[in-house]
Amino acid sequence: MDFIRTRDKILAAFGEVFYFRLTPVTGRYKQKYSRLFPNKQHVLSIYQVFDFGNIFSLINYGRDQQQSLIMVFAPNQRRGAPMLMITVAHAGTKVKVFYEYFNHSGSRFPEEKFIALKEKYGDIPTIAGRGSWNIPERRDYSLLKQSDNLFDLEKMLIRAANTYGRELIKWGDDPYDDFLVAMNRKLKSTRNVCSTVLSQSVGRLHLSDFVDRFVLPPLPLEKEEEEDE
């Protein structure tokens, strides 16, 4: 599976609704996270999404043909909307897809289109969810799939990303919703697939700062940069 192509197709589908741009990583951060820049085992991309928030993407080329793609969509300008985490893992002939929506149980965000999407792809085999760290916040309409049919999985990812964008564009911003702040803390403090990969990539000592600035920033990146100056 060509993860760069898959990532770009997901971004293009989401980009039909929201305009985004690649955020360059400055020299001091390249030095701080020198294990990632440059590194043939990792492809890191960070995007600023106007009127939405930020997208983080990390492609990891491991040993024995094990590859993974992690994408985190942080709607820090549309708080109250579900956060999205995509993990695609390829080992052997099977590909596992964890397309996970996270939100608090009291959210008023409309779920009908996401539920319908899950029903549409009901024929693709469903797998048991990964580690328990995030299950209380993971919404039931998340897509947890495994198949050797890469075409169907990629088609599902593209359709789901477009639906996510079209539903979020209807949603405003709730400044009193602190769900992303809570998930940011949980991602850093609980052992999980994403934090494990990141720890191996940037080092445990830099994990907290890396998550705050790039992976799941509670504030938009440009606002953080203004506050740093």
Image (cartoon, helix red, strand yellow):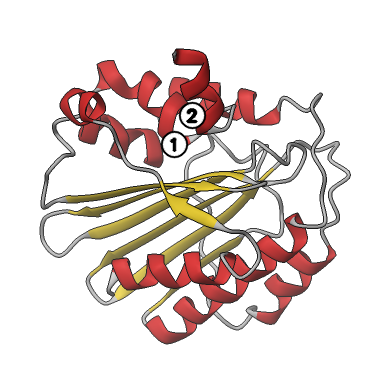
Left/right of residue 190 with respect to residue 50 in the rendered view: left
Q: Is residue 29 visible?
A: yes
For badge 1, the amino acid type reads: Val
Q: What kind of residue is marked 2?
A: Leu
- Nearer to the camera, 135 or 153: 153
Q: Residue at x 84, y 40 (%)?
A: 107
Disc 1 vs disc 2: Cβ atoms closer than 8 Å? yes
- The mark closer to the camera, 1 or 2, is 1
**Residue placed most toward the observer, 91 or 164:** 164
In the image, taking residue 46 as reference, residue 100 lies left or right, namely: right
Front position in the image: 10 or 142 = 10
Disc 1 residue crowd, few under 14, some 14–19, many 20+, Cα 10 Å: many
In the displayed structure, does residue 88 sit left or right of residue 75? left
- Which mark is on residue 164? none
How much space separates mark 1 and mark 2, taking CA atoms? 10 Å
Checking the image for residue 187, the label placed there is 2
- Residue 22 percent location from the top left of the image: 40, 51
Q: Position of residue 154 (x, y in %)?
A: 45, 77
Q: Is residue 190 visible?
A: no
Q: Quadrant of the N terminus?
A: bottom left
Q: Which residue is mark 1?
A: 215
Q: Quadrant of residue 99?
A: bottom right
Looking at marks 1 and 2 on the same chain, the residue that comes earlier in the sequence is marked by: 2
Secondary structure of the residue carrying numbered label 2: helix
